[in-house]
């Protein structure tokens, strides 16, 4: 296999053949997905970077890779700094960097199926300062030199039954149709894979860890729809599930179908649809209505069936994680375990439930200093042993038909240091503060983020990631529009039925990482005499928090009571699920782990 240096050289040669002075390589696919199939892993193939967000720019003499604060350490481990300059986002951006580094009069290429129209506008403006031009390519130059590029998945679509979805696809499409009629819209373009999966009550296996299928869709105001998907991915069961109101068309026909919308009012989401779609509709002289994908908000606000399924999935997953934590408490101090073996063991406990469809993301198991790499993924070359005197951070989740899980626990292997306990307890205090939050309707996640950071800030500490992200219902583990963060989002008002993570952390470079994550459900909260409706969080994830890392002297009475109540509820939910040969031993461990502080 060629080296990354060889690949960079090959791409530069291809750019010369295509008369380009540079090219932008984002980590996404034609649906602007966060997690993408192997065929779309262009950034990883070119650079070796395995994070879930990033971009690169290649020019004849310079190359830069752009990552956010989650990947500051990871990018340096995976990408050769002799060939690539590391650039931090949001301190800079691809567009801003191009405006400074592109040669005068340069032709900088981009794939219009991999960028938003807003990005194209920003990059064009930045390049204009150098009299340089942004050029849409018909053939992606990375694909032209990627000899062993995987084929897109051919996995079959599967129906997502109403007993999990809580609402039929026909009902969802009818409600979207009503919205379209009210807004004077003739057709709506859906390109986000999770929106398509939710709207049509279908699931797939085209993207690792996310049960979606590669497809496009057009919805019409009369409730009818067109689904564009590879024909071999559809069988009789899916056709029957979709019904006569859905026309199944070849995925290759999508662009021509857009061209047929001339003269129509067409809704397109500027954040979720690529520039090529807007350009095609412009050429067809359609009237473009730039509005948010109409599936986004109803998908985020879970219905009663989805909430019940979510609770069931969380309980099942919590029992699997608790079994793992018991196993780790016995085997960790003995030595002989590694990041890879503990990740495999945890997956085995989830698989033993008989309900696991997939993991919801690659397990992050970071031992010692690797725990300080926020989105670390162990490999044969990086996997560290699990050693006494260190912390082990394990962030993991499962995909079940009734729900998606995501939970992080940080465990002391042997006796922790006083500093570890202090930092862990500061993170715990922030976690509890957010879990206990009560707030009026209309509150945004950005307004709550400080609750989780306040105790770290008071000691001059912080963490470089958001505090909470939305979670789907047997869909993406990262789901918008809800978020708890002061940067990169968090402006969506929280509503009852939304599910988010609560995951403050602290990371000491070269030493250890700490994160405590549970999922929470936004619920209505009755307050006597309240002058407006209020909301609160109901914690959904249940597995013990490592008592050995809690400095009880740093907790207030209220915080201590929260931890005790959380552990009592964990024992109540997880305890009855423990069975098998080692049930009594695991139950005894759980009772001790959940005892009052």
Image (cartoon, rainbow, N blue to C red):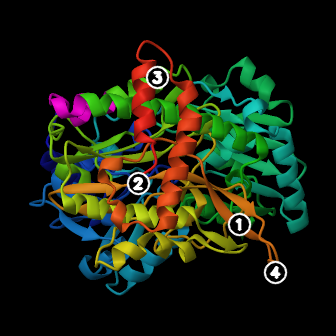
Task: Please give the name of the residue rendered at 41% of the width and 50% of the height, measured from the top-left corner.
Answer: 139
Count residues near mark 2 (Cα–Cα under 10 Å), then give few for <14, some for 14-19, many for 20+.
many
Nearer-the-camera pick, 338 or 458:
458
Q: Is residue 274 above or below residue 288?
A: above
Label 1 crowd bin: few (<14), some (14–19), many (20+), radius 10 Å = many
SS at circle 1: strand
CA distance separating discs 4 and 2:
34 Å
Q: Position of residue 332 (x, y in %)?
A: 23, 33
Q: Is residue 53 magenta?
A: no
Where is mark 3, residue-wise? 351
The residue that label 1 is drawn on is 535
Q: Secondary structure at mark 3?
A: helix
Question: Could you tell me how far apart the alpha carbons at marks 1 and 3 are, in whole angstroms?
Answer: 35 Å
Specify which label sits upstream in the sequence, 4 or 2: 2
Which is the main secondary structure of the residues drawn in magenta? Answer: helix
Q: What is the CA distance from the residue labelled 1 to the residue labelled 2?
A: 22 Å
* Mark before the other along the chain sequence, 1 or 2: 2
Q: From this viewpoint, is residue 491 visible?
A: yes
Q: Residue 300 location, x and y as percent? A: 67, 54
Magenta part of the chain? 331-344
Could you tell whether 506 is left or right of 489 in the image? left
Q: Horizontally, is 543 left or right of 230 in the view?
A: left
> Quick check: marks 2 and 3 in contact, CB under 8 Å?
no
Question: Residue 85 at what x, y percent from top left?
Answer: 18, 66
Q: Nearer the viewer, mark 2 or mark 3?
A: 2
Mark 2 lies on residue:
516
């Amino acid at each position: 296999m060629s080296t990354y240096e060889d690949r960079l050289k090959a791409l530069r040669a291809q750019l010369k053949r295509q008369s380009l002075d540079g090219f932008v390589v984002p980590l996404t696919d034609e649906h602007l997905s966060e997690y993408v199939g192997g065929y779309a892993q262009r950034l990883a193939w070119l650079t070796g970077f395995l994070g879930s967000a990033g971009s690169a720019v290649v020019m004849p003499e310079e190359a830069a890779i752009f990552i956010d604060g989650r990947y500051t350490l990871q990018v340096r481990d995976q990408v050769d700094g002799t060939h690539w300059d590391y650039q931090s986002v949001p301190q800079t951006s691809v567009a801003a960097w191009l405006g400074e580094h592109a040669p005068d009069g340069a032709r900088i290429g981009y794939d219009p199926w991999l960028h938003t129209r807003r990005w194209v506008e920003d990059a064009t403006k930045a390049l204009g300062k150098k009299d340089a031009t942004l050029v849409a390519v018909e053939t992606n130059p990375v694909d032209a030199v990627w000899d062993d590029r995987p084929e897109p998945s051919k996995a079959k679509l599967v129906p997502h039954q109403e007993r999990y979805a809580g609402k039929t696809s026909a009902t969802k499409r009818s409600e979207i149709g009503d919205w379209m009629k009210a807004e004077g819209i003739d057709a709506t373009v859906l390109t986000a894979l999770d929106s398509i999966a939710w709207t049509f009550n279908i699931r797939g296996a085209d993207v690792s860890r996310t049960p979606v299928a590669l497809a496009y869709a057009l919805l019409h105001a009369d409730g009818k729809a067109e689904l564009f998907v590879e024909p071999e991915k559809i069988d009789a069961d899916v056709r029957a599930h979709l019904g006569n109101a859905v026309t199944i068309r070849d995925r290759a026909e999508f662009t021509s179908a857009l061209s047929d919308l001339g003269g129509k009012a067409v809704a397109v989401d500027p954040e979720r649809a690529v520039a090529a779609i807007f350009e095609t509709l412009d050429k067809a002289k359609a009237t473009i209505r730039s509005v948010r994908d109409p599936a986004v908000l109803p998908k985020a606000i879970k219905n009663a069936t989805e909430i019940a399924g979510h609770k069931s999935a969380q309980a099942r997953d919590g029992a699997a994680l608790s079994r793992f934590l018991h196993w780790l408490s016995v085997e960790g101090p003995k030595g002989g375990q590694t990041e890879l073996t503990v990740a495999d063991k945890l997956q085995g406990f989830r698989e033993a439930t008989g309900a696991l469809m997939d993991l919801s993301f690659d397990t992050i198991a970071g031992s010692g200093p690797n725990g300080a790499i926020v989105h670390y993924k162990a490999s044969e070359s990086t996997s560290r042993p699990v050693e006494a005197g260190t912390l082990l951070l394990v962030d993991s989740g499962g995909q079940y038909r009734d729900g998606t899980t995501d939970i992080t626990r940080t465990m002391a292997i042997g006796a922790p240091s006083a500093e570890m306990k202090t930092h862990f307890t500061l993170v715990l205090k922030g976690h509890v503060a957010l879990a206990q939050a009560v707030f009026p309707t209309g509150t945004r996640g950005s307004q709550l983020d400080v609750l989780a950071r306040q105790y770290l800030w008071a000691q001059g500490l912080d963490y470089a990631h958001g505090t909470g992200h939305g979670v789907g219902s047997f869909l993406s583990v990262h789901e918008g529009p809800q978020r708890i963060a002061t940067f990169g989002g968090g402006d969506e008002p929280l509503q009852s039925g939304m599910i988010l993570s609560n995951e403050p952390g602290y990371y000491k470079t070269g030493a250890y990482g700490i994160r405590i994550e549970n999922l929470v459900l936004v619920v209505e909260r009755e307050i006597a005499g309240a002058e407006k409706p209020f909301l609160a969080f109901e914690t959904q994830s249940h597995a013990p928090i490592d008592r050995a890392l809690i400095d009880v002297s740093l907790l207030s009475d209220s915080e201590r009571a929260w931890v005790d109540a959380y552990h009592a509820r964990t024992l109540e939910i997880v305890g009855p699920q423990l069975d098998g040969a080692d049930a009594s031993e695991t139950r005894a461990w759980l009772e001790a782990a959940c005892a009052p502080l």
